[in-house]
Amino acid sequence: MSEIDIDIVNGEIGIHPSAIIHPNAEIAEGVSIGPYSIIGRDVKIGKGTRIGPHIVIEGWTEIGENNIISQFSSLGGNAQSVKYKGEKTYLRIGNNNLIREYVTLNRGTVQGRGETVIGDNNFIMAYAHIAHDCKIGNNVIIANSVGLAGHIDIDDNAIIGGMTGVHQFVRIGANTMVGAMSGIPLDIPPYVSASGNRASLYGLNVIGLKRQGFSEELIDDLKLAYKIIFRSKLILSDAIKKVRGEIVMSKELEYFLNFIEASERGICR
């Protein structure tokens, strides 16, 4: 039995004597670091965060408070991009995230936003990969073996099913449900369900919206907007004009339409 016993799940606090920590790493109070983990230079870890055994955290990585990072994960590694030449770029992780085994999170590139950003209260399951310059919002669930290429944005409360692959530069809107084993080459609008290789839309994510407190009236408005945009024979610009003319605008509906209008890759249909 070692002198310091680490229990990542139940929050036993301590730094195991076998952990290797660079002298300039900033470790806040109440951080636990498990056996054989390596904390590199220029790493900052906020209070209450629990680092499991056999974890490597390197580069310019900033981790907030009360995160749980499970064994064998690799955080802050160089961007997997042929354009990356060792520049100073960042991985920034917020608070209260649960990161499970073998997850890899890479830093950004100077050609992109210069940072990879993980928000708050996210659940990233085993073997997931989040590449350079991605931006993950809050309360997102990324299931096992999901692969996110570079420059991907995922908004709040989205759920990405296991073994899904997402093409670089894709945007996935808030409160979206993506089915398992999907291939996502184009943007997924907010509030919808999508699945398949290549992914198609399958109506609103009604169950998810109800769980997030959306009213029946608001869901009905979003259903009508969805029907006009994706099931009428109107071209997209005319369909959006029709929605704006026939449905009373709410912030949620405005976000839905703005997301579609701003798409550069195109929208899954």
Image (tube, grey):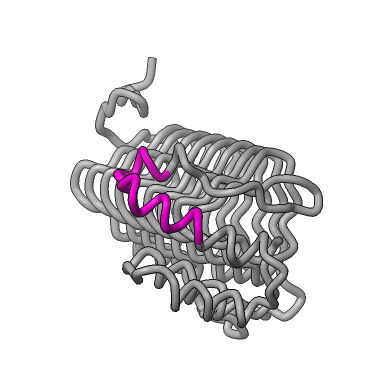
In which quadrant of the rendered image does the N terminus lie? top left
Asked if the magenta segment contains residue 105, the reply would be: no
In which quadrant of the rendered image does the C terminus lie? bottom right
- Camera sees residue 58: no
Image point (50%, 67%), residue name: 116
Does 223 sit above or below residue 168?
Answer: above
Percent x, y of residue 7 = 34, 24
Percent x, y of residue 58 = 50, 59
Left or right position of 247 against 186: left
Does 125 sit above or below residue 58?
Answer: above
Image point (36%, 28%), residue name: 8
Image point (40%, 50%), residue name: 219
Percent x, y of residue 205 = 51, 45
- Kindly give the residue lying farthest to the top in the view shown: 1
Does 97 sit above or below residue 113?
Answer: above
Does 49 sit above or below residue 254?
Answer: above
Asked if the magenta segment contains residue 220, the reply would be: yes
- Kindly give the residue lying farthest to the left in the view shown: 29
- Kindly give the residue lying farthest to the right in the view shown: 197
Q: Quadrant of residue 250?
A: bottom left
Front residue of 195/218: it is 218
- Kindly give the residue lying farthest to the bottom in the view shown: 111
Q: How many marks?
A: 0
Left or right position of 37 against 212: right
> From which residue to which does the magenta span run?
209-224
- Camera sees residue 93: yes
Percent x, y of residue 232 = 67, 65
Front residue of 68/216: it is 216
Front residue of 205/11: it is 205
Magenta segment's dominant SS is: helix
Image point (27%, 53%), residue name: 46
